[in-house]
Image (tube, rainbow, N blue to C red):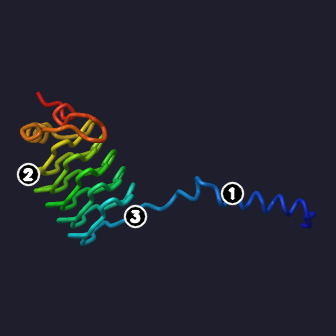
Amino acid sequence: MMYSRQGLALLLTVIICWVASPVLADWTHPLSFSNAELGRQDFSGQSLQAAEFSNANLEMANFAGADLRGTVFSASVMTKANLHGANLTNAMVNEVKLNGADLSDAILLEALLLRSIFTDVNIEGADFSDAILDRSQIQELCKKASGVNSQTGVETRESLGCR
């Protein structure tokens, strides 16, 4: 197939525009840390959208201020993890051990939190709006709920539906 000089230049321009497209440039494969030993790791401030941490050991891991939207933490151990100010919107945090974790000022909008353990957690200013929790979890969290989320302006007690 023969192309004129102008036709070849046009074809090359189209290919360059397609390859350099911002939509394609922003797309990346989600990170997978499933079954990993990541205790004490520092993920603070990182963008980890849609990452997978299923069945991972995340004891004392630091996720402060991290973008964790759509991230999967199912069946992980997050004892004493720092999630202060993290955005966990639409995250799957089901069956996770969060004993002693810091969830202060975290955003948990529409997060799935069923069967997770919240013993001795700090939830001051956390926003649980539209999160999916067991009734017993809500009752337990309402006993310690206080504060207002600095990013959403929502009261923790209100977001949990505490009476």
Q: Residue 20: percent from the left, percent from the top?
A: 65, 60
Specify the quadrant of the image occupied by residue 4: bottom right
Amino acid type of the residue tagged 3 in the rendering: Leu
Specify the quadrant of the image occupied by residue 53: bottom left
Q: Residue 152: percent from the left, percent from the top?
A: 30, 37
109 versus 43 height, above or below = above
Helix, strand or loop for disc 2: loop
| Label of residue 31 in the image | 3
Residue at figure coordinates x 13%, y 38% from the top left? 146
Helix, strand or loop for disc 3: loop
Residue at figure coordinates x 12%, y 51% from the top left? 121
Helix, strand or loop for disc 1: helix
> In this image, 22 relative to 15: left or right?
left
Q: Earlier in the sequence, mark 1 or mark 3?
A: 1
> In this image, 42 relative to 5: left or right?
left
| Label of residue 18 in the image | 1
Q: Residue 158: percent from the left, percent from the top?
A: 19, 31
Q: CA distance from mark 3 to mark 2?
A: 29 Å
Residue at figure coordinates x 27%, y 44% from the top left? 108
Q: Earlier in the sequence, mark 3 or mark 2?
A: 3
**Quadrant location, the N terminus:** bottom right
4 versus 152 height, above or below = below
Q: CA distance from mark 2 to mark 1?
A: 51 Å
Q: Earlier in the sequence, mark 2 or mark 1?
A: 1
User: Badge 2 is on which residue?
Assistant: 119
